[in-house]
Image (spheres, rainbow, N blue to C red):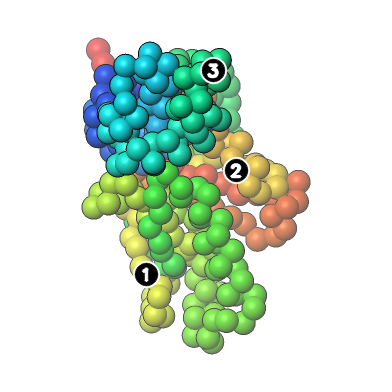
Amino acid sequence: MEWIKSLRLSIDYMEKHLLESVGPEEVADAVFMSPFYFQKGFKIITGYSIGEYIRYRRLYMAALDVISGDEKIIDLAYKYGYDTPESFTKAFSRFHGVSPKQMKGDTKKIKIFLPLKISVSVRGGNDMDYVVEKLDAMKVIGYEKNFLYETGYQEIPKFWNEFCHNCTDGKNNEQVQKVIEECMIGEFGICIEDDSKQKEFLYMIAGRYNGGSVPEGMKIFEIPAFEWAKFKCTGPMPGALQSVNTQIFKEWLPGNPDYEIAAGMNIEMYSNGDCSSYDYESEIWIPVKKKQQHK
């Protein structure tokens, strides 16, 4: 249950530092977790990104201050981390549906957003369709791009659409298209924690690198040797993949007595075929290591 305990501790940390300049990387560090998996798991379990949670909590607290009428708008803006009264008022109005001035006259308009209580039902985690397999280091080749944790999972599909359109619309030159086909670029979607950019992670559309020239715009990355928990997904994309991802974080990680995450990385493996078909097969690979058994 270390995973769930860490999430609960993270909420306590955010509450204690709500008026300070804290972001996802500081919160993850405070609970000794990988920012990559911490933010991904937090979003899956709570439905909010770290940034959204902190922002919504601040705007709720700001509304309580507005109702009390003790502070000016400019003071509230700076207190809750906004650069100007205008940006604060805009965010406040978007969240509560009324401006700070309007709320003073109608306190029923306040949108309540209390601290989250993490509660996960641990069931069936070890009955998921997965295997643990040790793989040697593997080189991949493909296109990479950095994404913000806050918006990455909305932006990545656009990255894939651009890649697919270039392949199908004849925009790639002969050399590029040859490498894409020979290395099966598009077989993998790889998320990689970027230690140098704590607010971002690296994403690759990739395939196995078999040697040879590397076309301009492509990159090579070596995936270290790990044991991988490989989860099978069956069904149309992206629903099947998202469903299994949710199970991993809500059931498998909290309830698994043997394994824990080994590195800030995960791989999505895509097969050939119609990805909208009910029997389309894909996989999620997560690097894992055996938990230390405490005597």
Residue in the picture at 70% in, 44% down = 235
Q: Residue 14's quadrant in the figure?
A: top left
Hey, what amino acid is under mark 1? Lys
9 sits left or right of 95 in the view: left
| SS class, disc 2 | helix
Image location of residue 209, percent across then percent down: 42, 69
Residue 109 at x, y percent in the picture: 55, 20
Please state the horizontal and vertical placement of residue 282, each as a whole percent of the image.
61, 49
Q: Residue under circle 1?
A: 219
Residue 16 visible to an observer of this rendering: yes
Q: CA distance from mark 2 to mark 3?
A: 44 Å
Relative depth, front residue between 281 and 57: 57
Label placed on residue 9: none
Instruction: Name the residue at 44% across, 54% down.
Output: 190
Q: Amino acid at mark 2?
A: Leu
Q: Which label was assigned to residue 241?
A: 2
Q: Which mark is residue 106?
A: 3
Disc on the earlier residue, 1 or 3 = 3
Residue depicted at 40% across the width and 32% down the height: 55
Residue 48 appears anywhere in the view: no
